Each structure stands twice: as structure tokens, then as C-alpha cells.
Image (cartoon, rainbow, N blue to C red):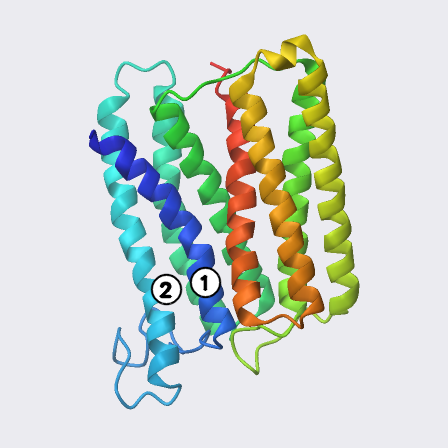
Amino acid sequence: MPLMPVILTILVILQSGLIVTGGAVRLTGSGLGCPTWPQCTKGSFKPIAHQAQGQLHAWIEFGNRLLTFVLFFVAVAAVIMTIRASINRFDKRRVRLLAIFQLVGILGQGVLGGITVLTHLNPIPVAGHFLLTIALIAGAISLRQRMLNRPAVELSETETVMTKVLLFLTLIVIVLGTVVTGSGPHAGDIQARRFGFDPRTVSWIHADSVIALISLTIGLLLILRISPAGQSKPFFAKAVKIFFLVCIAQGGIGYIQYFTGLPELVVGTHLLGSALVWCSMWNVYVMKSLAKK
């Protein structure tokens, strides 16, 4: 098996995995398991036996930091392979910038993670940490789909507008999700600051945006179904259907966590779902963008 598809796929998986491991840090109250940065504790880059915050919390936070290092080396490999494989490509400059963005973004994640720790889990850098991951996931998917020459589609004006609106609304849903998270009880540490919004109010605003997103997705699916031109785009229609199903599942998990009092396991599943929602949406969007030279 060629190595490039494997490396680019691992890159997407690891970028998405940061959302899950970061959520595990927060949900287990391990946000300050390593209370300083770049060291875990003063004088040590790894947890120490007498650490006051507790060994388990320290290793959970330390494990999240280690994943960033693994991700960095995978990104380095992706950059090298992309540069070598793109010499004769028409989109050489674009794919190389996408690959370099992964490296720069991962370094930015390290700095932002340090700010998060040093500000004692202030919800603003915590949300920023998450949103930068979202941007890096989008870049990793775009890089993978371009380098592997995935199918591109030419959309009608209506389909193009709806796809762009879907992408924008998905981003709104995710941003609102960070506000809900920053207003709720799972702060990563009992003394961490919160946004101060009413959790119930922001949760329902977030839920309403999800309903709007699902409704618009149904609209795009109907257009693709009834339009002869839409029926000629099976790869695109399948990607939209996958996005729709992921949104339905994610919405269901969201309601379950709300009405069951935010149990950690369900909240963690919802975090995984947020990564899948974004991955599936960007996969829809990138099919359109691939058609542009």
C-alpha cells in the first residue's frame, strides 16, 4: 500500500482525535493535571510521583500533550511527501500551503494550549483551542482529498449557495457548542472560570441552530433528488446523505446529554460527534472546491 494515503489519513484521524482527548482532559477534571507549560510541573516535562494534582489527572493531561507531538511528526511526513509528489501538479502551490498550514497550526496549538493552562482554563482560549483544531481538520481533509485526486463536482448556482450556507451554519453550530461547553459544568477543573451565560438558554439556542442545519440539509437532498443534474452527482449526494445522518445522530446525543444531566460518557460521545459532523460537512464542501483550478 502506498504510504501517502496512509499518512494523510492518519493526519485527519489524529487532528480529529485531539477533540476527543481534549474532551477527556476536561471531562475528567484533568485540565490542570499539568499545572504549567511547556513543562508538566516545575522542573519536569512529565508527571512526577508526588504531584499534588494526582497521578491520574497528570497522565491524562500529559497524554494529550504527547498526542500533539505524534501529530507534529505525522505532519512533517505529510509535508515532505506532499512537496515530493506535487512537483508536476497544477495545484502545487495550494497543496504545499495546506501541508505547511498543518505544521504551523500544530505549533500554534502548542502555544494556545500553554495559554489555556497558564490562564487556568479560561473558556476563551479553551474555545479557541477547539476552533483551531476545527480549522486544522478542514485543512487535513482538503490536503488528503486533493493529493488522492478524489472526485470533484460542478454544482448549480442553487446547490453552490446551499452548500456554502450549510458550511457556514455548521460552523455557527460548532461555535455555539463551545459557548454551551464554556457555560456548563465540565470545565476541566472545579475552579476554572465559565462564560457566565445561562446554560439552559445557550443550550436551546444551540439546539435551534442544529434544527436549522438539519432542515437545510434536507432541502439540499431534495434538490439533488428531483433535479436531473443533481442525480448525475452520486458522490456528492452520498456525501450530503452521510452528513445528514451524522447530524441526526449528533442531535439525538445532544438531547440525551441535556435531559440526563450531562453524564461524562455521553458528553464525550457528543464531542466525538462534533468532529464527525465537521469532517462530513467539510467532505461535502471540498468536493465543490476541488472543481476549482
Residue 179 lies, in percent from the top left, at 67, 60
**Residue at 69% of width from left, 15% of height from top?**
157
Looking at the image, which is closer to me, 113 or 146?
A: 146
Would you identify the image quadrant in which residue 136 lies?
top left
**Residue at 58% of width from left, 43% of height from top?**
246
> Quick one: label 2, few (<14), some, or many (20+) residues within 10 Å?
some
User: In this rendering, is residue 229 above or below 127?
Assistant: above
User: In this rendering, is residue 102 above or below 217?
Assistant: below
Disc sitting over residue 278 in the figure: none
**Residue at 37% of width from left, 20% of height from top?**
149
User: In this rendering, is residue 146 above or below 129?
Assistant: above
Q: Is residue 155 left or right of residue 146?
A: right
Mark 1–mark 2 contact, CB under 8 Å?
Answer: yes
- Identify the residue position indicated by label 2 in the image: 64
Quadrant in the picture for the N terminus: top left
> As shown in the figure, which amino acid type bears the numbered disc 1?
Gly
